[in-house]
Image: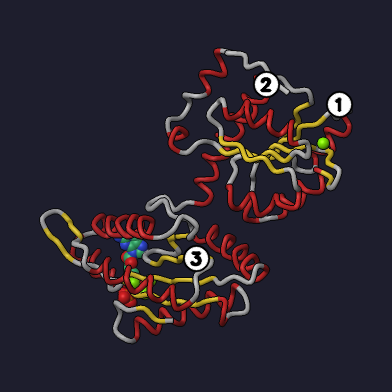
Amino acid sequence: LAWPLLAHELIDNLNFGDLGEKRDPLRVMIVEDMASLAGLYANVLNSHGVDALQVTDPARVLDGIVQFRPDLILMDMYMPECNGMELAQIIRQQRLLDGIPILFLSVEKRQSIQLDTLTLGIDGFLTKPVAPEELVVTVINRARRYRKLRSYMINDSLTGLLNHSHLYAQLEYEVLRAKRDQRALSLVMLDLDHFKTINDSYGHPAGDEVLVNLARFLKERLRRSDLISRYGGEEFAIVLPGTRQEDALRIMNAMRQAFSQIEQRSNQQTFHQTFSVGISSLASAEDTTQLVQQADDMLYQAKRLGRNRVEG
Ligand code: GH3
Ligand code: MG
Ligand code: MG
Ligand code: MG
Ligand code: MG
């Protein structure tokens, strides 16, 4: 199968819409049982700078979404093992995937059926055979809009880390997955020590800068699969999938020590900032609620025992 690539001016312009996409290309998941068709869509999207993941097994869709973090899902409506409508409804029920655009691609031409799918929360309908220009323009526009909105929904505006509510939704998902796969998982609660005095001594903007520095420090040192969030004002939560309690303790102790040695700067003055950490792990917690409670308790313990320490 080959698709003629038409060098349409409009489509070429789409490629330069957003420089950020050069570093972090838009991601589209293609759910289509016919591998040759999926490959065709993937090729045309790839040639316009879009990263496309082909999924032919519907059972792999949910995990695939969480790992690949698509900006849009392009889905076949009729697949032998699974009805696209049912799959779309399952996706719509996941809080973690709130608002992700789902476009159907189908030979279905009956308007009444297309309307039914829209009523059930599908964002749009492309009728096969679709012109490559229509596919590219529709997909890129939708994906781009969702990426922008999603960032407002899930990220903290000061640090760019995940916000509290998204971290919690992710944590619930990761806990279920870790239990299913019998894998380890640790949760870290981190709180800056005597942070109020930093604001009082150097001013609120200096405090903000410490928060941004810590966020960068955490991002640099942790793995891509770790979930880092600003959980509250000067409190951070980190989910370490696949990490056992003793390893989490070792990792966080090394980070605590390294961070405490960094010279923080504000105008002409320099100072040091420390943090305290509480850690819990799935080995000793039943569910998300217990995990959070135990990490909180351990953080409280770390504060009580003098701060600048890790407990778990
Ligand atoms: P402890 O070691 O017990 O945690 O002491 P603390 O001073 O860090 O804790 P406390 O809860 O008393 O005060 C937290 C401070 O964090 C107070 C608040 O002004 C500051 N804070 C919270 N959010 C922000 C923020 O976004 N920017 C700045 N600059 N400060 C913040
Ligand atoms: Mg099909
Ligand atoms: Mg406090
Ligand atoms: Mg504090
Ligand atoms: Mg606090």
Compare marks 1 and 2 and give the one earlier in the sequence: 1
Give the farthest residue toward the bottom: 305
Q: Quadrant of the C terminus?
A: bottom left
Q: Is residue 189 left or right of residue 36?
A: left
Residue at point 50% right, 70% down?
243
Residue farthest toward the left in the current orientation of the protein: 268
Q: Please, what is the three-letter code of the amino acid marked with disc 1?
A: Lys
Dot label at residue 28: none
Q: Quadrant of residue 216?
A: bottom left
Q: Earlier in the sequence, mark 3 or mark 1?
A: 1
Q: Position of residue 25 (x, y in %)?
A: 50, 36
Type of residue at label 2? Pro
Q: Going 74% across and 23% down the picture, which residue do you hit?
A: 130
* Residue pointed to by mark 2: 132
Describe the element under mark 1 as helix, strand or loop: loop
Label 3: element kind? strand
Quarter-wise, where is residue 127 in the image? top right
Quickly name the residue at label 1.
109
Q: Residue at x 72, y 41 (%)?
A: 31
- Mark 3 Cα shell of 10 Å, populated few (<14), some (14-19), many (≥20): many
Instruction: Respond yes or no on whether mark 3 lies under 8 Å from ligand 5.
Output: no
